[in-house]
Amino acid sequence: MREFLLGESADMVERGLIMAAIVVAAVALWFTIGQKLAAKLNVVNAAIGN
């Protein structure tokens, strides 16, 4: 993957699409983890009694 993205054999459109897919996947994962973490923190907060 690294050779494909950094090499000169790939087309710029292909590189752009792959980089965009990586960014979209990373953002989706970030929001998913963030929502799960927020839910866990709410449980802890409720258990503490705040």
Image: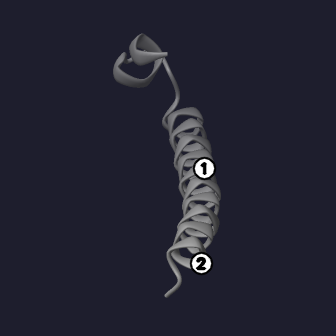
Q: Quadrant of residue 3?
A: top left
The crowding category of the residue bearing disc 1, from other C-alpha atoms within 10 Å (few below 14, some 14 to 19, many at least 20), is few
Q: Where is residue 37 in the image (x, y as percent from the top left)?
A: 55, 60
Q: Is residue 39 above or below residue 33?
A: below
Would you say 12 lies left or right of 43 here? left
What's the amino acid at mark 1?
A: Leu
Q: In which quarter of the image is residue 13?
A: top right
Q: Where is residue 49 in the image (x, y as percent from the top left)?
A: 53, 83
Residue that badge 2 annotates: 46
Q: Which of marks 1 and 2 is in front?
A: 2
Q: Nearer the viewer, residue 27 or 38?
A: 38
* Secondary structure of the residue carrying numbered label 2: helix
Q: In this view, does 13 lie above or below 30?
A: above
Mark 1 → mark 2, Cα distance in angstroms: 26 Å
Question: Which residue shows up at 49% across the image and 16% down it?
Answer: 1
Residue that badge 1 annotates: 29
Mark before the other along the chain sequence, 1 or 2: 1
Q: Which of 30 and 47 is in front in this view?
A: 47
Q: Mark 1 and 2 residues: CB-CB less than 8 Å, in contact?
A: no
Question: Which residue shows up at 56% across the image and 48% down it?
Answer: 20
What's the amino acid at mark 2?
A: Ala
Would you say 49 lies left or right of 2 here? right
- Say how the picture is coloured: one colour
The crowding category of the residue bearing disc 2, from other C-alpha atoms within 10 Å (few below 14, some 14 to 19, many at least 20), is few
Q: Is residue 39 above or below residue 27?
A: below
Q: Position of residue 30 (x, y in %)?
A: 53, 55
Q: Where is residue 8 in the image (x, y as percent from the top left)?
A: 37, 18
